[in-house]
Image (cartoon, helix red, strand yellow):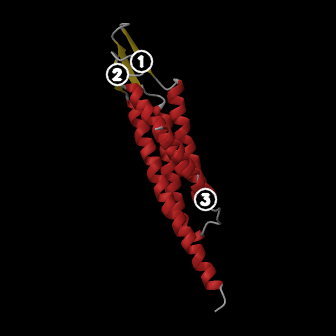
Amino acid sequence: MVFAVVALICVGVAAARVSQPFVPQPSLWPARCLVTALAVSGAVMLGVSLTFTWWIVHDWEREDTLVTRGDARLVQIIVVAGLACVLLTIRAVWGRRNWTPLGLILAWPILGFGWFASTGESVDSDASGEAGTGLSVATWALLLITIAAVLGSFERLAEHRAHRRQHADRAPS
């Protein structure tokens, strides 16, 4: 498992290093604005998720109920990872290097650990848990950010294609 994560991180770093900064084409501003709006919507959803309960774990041995809200450290790590993906997506679509895949490679497993924690298994094997609204909203937010990143990748391809077309038109025949 660790090897797979390290390999994915290496692939993400290599892909980001290969991606080149570019001057955005004026004709593709609607696509950039759409990607930016989707990413910002995901960021707003992540912020809103902090106001809800993320998960509730019932520890039967200790006869205690643990409620996790937006002030928990893991919740904050999940939100910061999602916000980093938003920032990377917006930077990539407006002409910077594309580090978004690496951000998503790291953000989804962190969110997955949040879902694992909501089962109660991280507290005790006899504990049971349930996911709260905050975790669901954060999952939908990260899905929206991922969709924005995929659309941003298509927009980057269109940018490069338009850039190549401009250079081909300028080349002497």
Q: Tell me if I can see residue 43 in this picture.
A: no
Query: Percent position (x, y) of residue 13?
Result: 59, 51
Q: Is 14 above or below relative to 123?
A: below
Marks 1 and 2, the one that precedes in the sequence:
1
**Residue at x 49% of width, y 53% of height:** 149
SS of the residue under disc 1: loop
Q: Which residue is mark 1?
A: 123
- The residue type indicated by label 2 comes to Gly
**Residue at x 57% of width, y 56% of height:** 15
Q: Nearer the viewer, mark 1 or mark 2?
A: 1
Calculate the distance from the C-alpha at mark 1 to the C-alpha at mark 2. Answer: 10 Å
For residue 52, what is the image quadrant? top left
Q: Is residue 17 left or right of residue 143?
A: right
Marks 2 and 3, the one that precedes in the sequence:
3
Q: Is residue 126 left or right of residue 86?
A: left
Q: Which residue is mark 2?
A: 129
Query: Percent position (x, y) of residue 25?
Result: 60, 69
Q: Tell me if I can see residue 82 in this picture.
A: yes
